[in-house]
Amino acid sequence: MPDFNSIISTIHSQLDASADRGSVATYIPELAGVDEKNFGIYLNCISGESHKIGAWNKPFSIQSISKVLSLAQAFSLVGDSIWKRVDVEPSGNPFNHLSLLELENGIPRNPLINAGALVIADILVSQLDNPKEDFLDYVRNLTNDFSIQFNTKVALSEKSTGFRNYAAANLLKSFGNLNNDVETVLDFYFHQCSLEMNCEQLSNAFYFLANRGKCMRDHAFLNESQVKRINALMLTCGFYDEAGEFAFEVGLPGKSGVGGGIIALLPNQFTIATWSPGLNEKGNSHLGMQALEKFTTATQLSIF
Ligand code: GLN
């Protein structure tokens, strides 16, 4: 077994010294004030050990990382019928891009870009009695942590500037690929994106995708074939137009968010969460991407 402790602390201190930390997302006003000096890593091994360094216990906005959790819940509720409404191909485009959606008649390329996540949100709004509460409950159960919350300020802040998401939702609606009204779906979506977690909670939440569908308490949330599909989507679509780069550099299924978090995992081995709020020009955490590249290189643990 590699010496995880010394590997993650070396990576952390090397990168923490870098002058270029990327820039914090400002298009959601409430996120603009987050201190870009934060940098944490949490490694959660299936064997039971864990290793952590830096700001691993500070909560942050998980943003697009939530798209994997909403997909998991929708998948467990409606199964393969999801794929009639959303495709499974990488987009090669930024997360909020709209032109392909028009070209492809309102069928989003995949569930991890915004348009696809809006279709998943629509499915959950239709399926759940109290959509926001029930989704929050699902995430809390998955993580076995009932302190997890939405940050309503962040949700409302995004709502006030979410013009592109309004455009995407309206486009989907015009193609008949939203059953609920635009406001309701967006309200759900902005709340799911506003979920706050620290690196440990994030690594716990995603444990089931490294553990054949079973969470840390050994409850099954998805079957193995569903886990395979979600991990494949994370590998090919989890980083928007940098998904190829992430597979190339890191070689793990993963998902990023504009809050600066990244979750990545190696099936049957570990989940690893990083948080550094400065983003690169593609909207992915600048230090997080580098940390994970260094981690899989040093440990020689990747799916390849
Ligand atoms: N809530 C954000 C948005 O829709 C999520 C984007 C992201 O994290 N990449 O713009």
Image (tube, rainbow, N blue to C red):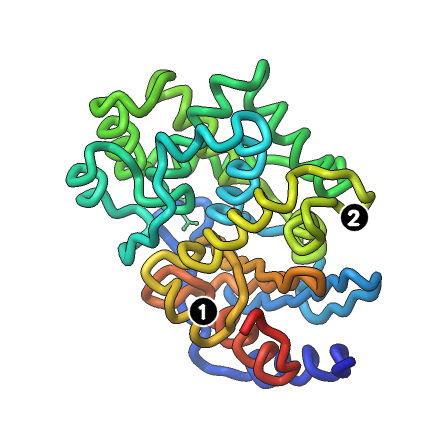
Instruction: Indicate the amino acid at tag 2.
Output: Met
Q: Nearer the viewer, residue 97 or 266?
A: 266
Disc assigned to residue 216: 2
Residue at 59%, 77% in the rendered image: 296
Q: Position of residue 280 (x, y in %)?
A: 38, 68
Quarter of the image where the C terminus is located: bottom right
Q: Position of residue 88 (x, y in %)?
A: 38, 46
Residue identifier under label 1: 247
- For this orientation, the residue located farthest to the front is 225
Mark 1 C-beta to ligand 1 under 8 Å? no
- Tag 2–tag 1 contact (CB < 8 Å): no
Report helix, strand or loop for mark 1: helix
Report helix, strand or loop for mark 2: loop
Task: Left or right? Give the position of 203 relative to 190.
Answer: right
Task: Left or right? Give the position of 97 relative to 70.
Answer: left
**Quarter holding residue 2:** bottom right
Alpha-carbon neighbours of circle 1 within 10 Å: few (<14), some, or many (≥20)? many
Task: Left or right? Give the position of 4 relative to 258.
Answer: right
